[in-house]
Amino acid sequence: MHLTTASRTIQQAVGQRSFSVSAAAASATAAKKQFLVVAWDHTDGEALNRRLSVRPAHMKGALELKESKTLQLGGAILTDHTENGKMKGSIMIFNADSEDEVRKLVEKDQYVVGKVWEKYDIYPFRTAPNPYA
């Protein structure tokens, strides 16, 4: 299988996991396009403290986006799965009309405003159907 650099980066970031969406969520967002956002944290010594200080506001915003079905899922990218695994970034799947809409949402996220995320990439995305649902 031929992978582009972006595909390899995404696989390294999130592993070879598949994400699924329920039939109800799929029909509710049928007119919207999906976008995968991969955001990387700043690496300076204060990055984790900034993350923790703005996390409540970030989570409040994420919950509002989840309730409106704009945010399908999100989570932290870890250095590893040990007890000492640290957060080094985030992934999110958005349902939106355009990449520009997603960019505007990400730019006002508290992790951007609070200088937690150093950079992010937005990819067109499509969730695979879940054969086990």
Image (tube, rainbow, N blue to C red):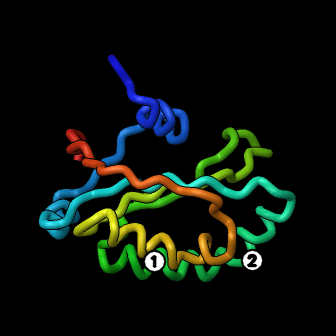
Residue situated furthest right in the rendering = 45
Please state if 20 lies on the left or on the right of 116 as rendered: left
Q: Nearer the viewer, residue 74 or 44?
A: 44
Q: Total marks drawn?
A: 2
Find residue 106 and name its label.
none
Which of the image's four quarters has the N terminus? Answer: top left
Q: Quadrant of residue 132?
A: top left
Residue lying at 53% horizontally and 82% vertically, measured from the top left: 60
Q: Nearer the viewer, residue 94 or 117?
A: 117
x%, y% of residue 16? 44, 32
Amino acid found under the numbered disc labelled 1: Leu
* Label 1 Cα neighbours within 10 Å, binned few <14 / some 14-19 / many ≥20: some
User: Is residue 114 placed above or below 33 in the rendered structure?
Assistant: below
User: Is residue 16 placed above or below 126 in the rendered structure?
Assistant: above
Determine the secondary structure under disc 2: helix
| Residue 82 in view, yes or no | yes
Instruction: Identify the residue under disc 2.
Output: 53
Residue lying at 13% horizontally and 63% vertically, measured from the top left: 30
Q: Quadrant of residue 50?
A: bottom right
Residue lying at 49% horizontally and 80% vertically, measured from the top left: 61
Amino acid found under the numbered disc labelled 2: Ser
Structural distance between the alpha carbons of marks 1 and 2: 17 Å
Marked residue nearer the N-terminal end (1 or 2) = 2
Instruction: Identify the residue under disc 1.
Output: 63
Residue lying at 44% horizontally and 58% vertically, measured from the top left: 92
| Residue 90 in view, yes or no | no
Please state if 81 lies on the left or on the right of 97 as rendered: right
x%, y% of residue 45? 86, 58
Of tags 1 and 2, which is closer to the observer?
Answer: 2
User: Is residue 72 placed above or below 67 in the rendered structure?
Assistant: above
Residue situated furthest top in the rendering = 1
x%, y% of residue 26? 18, 60
